[in-house]
């Protein structure tokens, strides 16, 4: 039975820890984890000079009918300078805990991804790719003062410097196996796998081919069935995490996620036969993660 503990236990393959990440870091030996996949605070709720959004109070259509709420989470509130210090501190702990040449995969938006990228360059970590996750069903921008933000990003780096980085894990063929393209036999155009007919000519007869995984991932936002045990404001879809775990880790590898939230990284790690250290300082989110891992690690698994 998976339990939530307050401390890291090296004798366990599956560590679900409810504590401040920095308290847990202190107990994890150097080079213990193979990789990190994490979705840290973006500081959307905090940052200096943030203005109150007036239409949230005045526009009842969005607040009452559409149930719009801003992200206002205490774990996501920092001053700009505090956020910079926080980010540098946890990254340095990850550089220590993850093995040399282990993969470092970090989520972000324009709020924080450039800071993280700059710090990875500051510490001379080899950056392999940036992945753009396109959320086709992203929430609309209702201020009408900027483009609709419909992407998030993943920086994929290696825990070594530019000269010494080598032999990092990349399962090219496994990702190619799941990147199946449908081709209409009538008009020869590519058709998205989710569609049963060709949008160009209406044909339903297709051929298929496997192709290289691109760094643009067209995956909808987290579906309702993945939130059945509770909600987290920044929960990532299983499909996004499955691609990272499948492509950039191997079976029995140890994956650490120091900001696990609803537990999607541990969930996918277990379903794909990896070990994990999942950490969150919120007791309710840890319990949500535990329920998902126990009950849904097989059901939520896709056909990888």
Image (cartoon, rainbow, N blue to C red):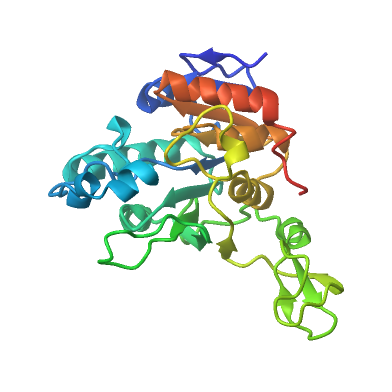
Above or below 290: residue 249: below
Viewer can see residue 159: no
- Which residue in the rendered view is the most extreme toward the left? 49
Above or below 178: residue 202: below
Left or right of residue 246: residue 59 = left
Above or below 111: residue 263: above
Viewer can see residue 54: yes
Q: Residue 196's image quarter? A: bottom right
Residue 245: image x %, image y %? Answer: 64, 46
- Which residue in the rendered view is the most extreme toward the bottom? 187
Left or right of residue 284: residue 14 = right
Residue closer to the observer: 284 or 126: 284
Which image quadrant: the N terminus?
top right
Residue drawn at x 48%, y 33% is: 231
Left or right of residue 128: residue 204 = right
Residue 57: image x %, image y %? Answer: 20, 44
Residue 108: image x %, image y %? Answer: 40, 51
Residue drawn at x 30%, y 54% is: 111
Residue closer to the observer: 281 or 70: 70
Residue drawn at x 31%, y 44% is: 63
Q: How many labels does the image show?
A: 0
Residue drawn at x 78%, y 48% is: 303
Residue 84: image x %, image y %? Answer: 24, 45
Q: Residue 214's image quarter? A: bottom right
Left or right of residue 56: residue 138 = right
Above or below 190: residue 179: above
């Amino acid at each position: 039975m998976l339990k939530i503990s307050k401390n890291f236990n090296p004798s366990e393959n599956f560590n679900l820890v409810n504590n401040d990440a920095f308290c847990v870091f202190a107990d994890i030996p150097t080079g213990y984890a193979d990789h990190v996949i994490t979705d840290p605070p973006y500081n959307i709720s905090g940052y200096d000079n943030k203005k109150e959004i007036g239409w949230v109070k005045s526009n009842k259509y969005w607040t009452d009918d559409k149930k719009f709420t801003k992200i206002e989470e205490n774990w996501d509130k920092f001053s700009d300078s505090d956020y910079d210090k926080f980010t540098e501190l946890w990254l340095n702990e990850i550089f220590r805990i993850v093995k040399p040449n282990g993969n470092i995969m970090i989520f972000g938006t324009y709020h924080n991804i450039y800071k993280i990228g700059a710090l990875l360059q500051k510490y001379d970590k080899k950056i392999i790719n940036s992945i753009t996750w396109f959320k086709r069903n992203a929430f609309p921008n209702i201020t009408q003062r900027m483009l609709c933000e419909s992407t998030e990003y993943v920086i994929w780096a290696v825990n070594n410097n530019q000269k010494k980085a080598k032999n990092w894990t990349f399962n090219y063929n496994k990702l190619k196996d799941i990147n199946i393209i449908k081709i209409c036999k009538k008009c020869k155009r590519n058709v998205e796998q989710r569609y049963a007919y060709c949008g160009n000519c209406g044909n339903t007869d297709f051929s298929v081919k496997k192709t290289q995984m691109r760094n643009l991932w067209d995956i909808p936002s987290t579906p309702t069935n993945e939130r059945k045990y509770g909600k987290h404001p920044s929960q990532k879809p299983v499909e996004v995490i499955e691609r990272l775990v499948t492509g950039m880790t191997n079976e029995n590898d140890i994956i650490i996620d120091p900001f696990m939230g609803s537990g999607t990284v541990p969930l996918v790690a277990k379903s794909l036969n990896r070990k994990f250290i999942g950490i969150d300082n919120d007791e309710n989110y840890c319990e949500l993660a535990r329920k998902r891992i126990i009950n849904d690690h097989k059901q939520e698994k896709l056909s990888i």
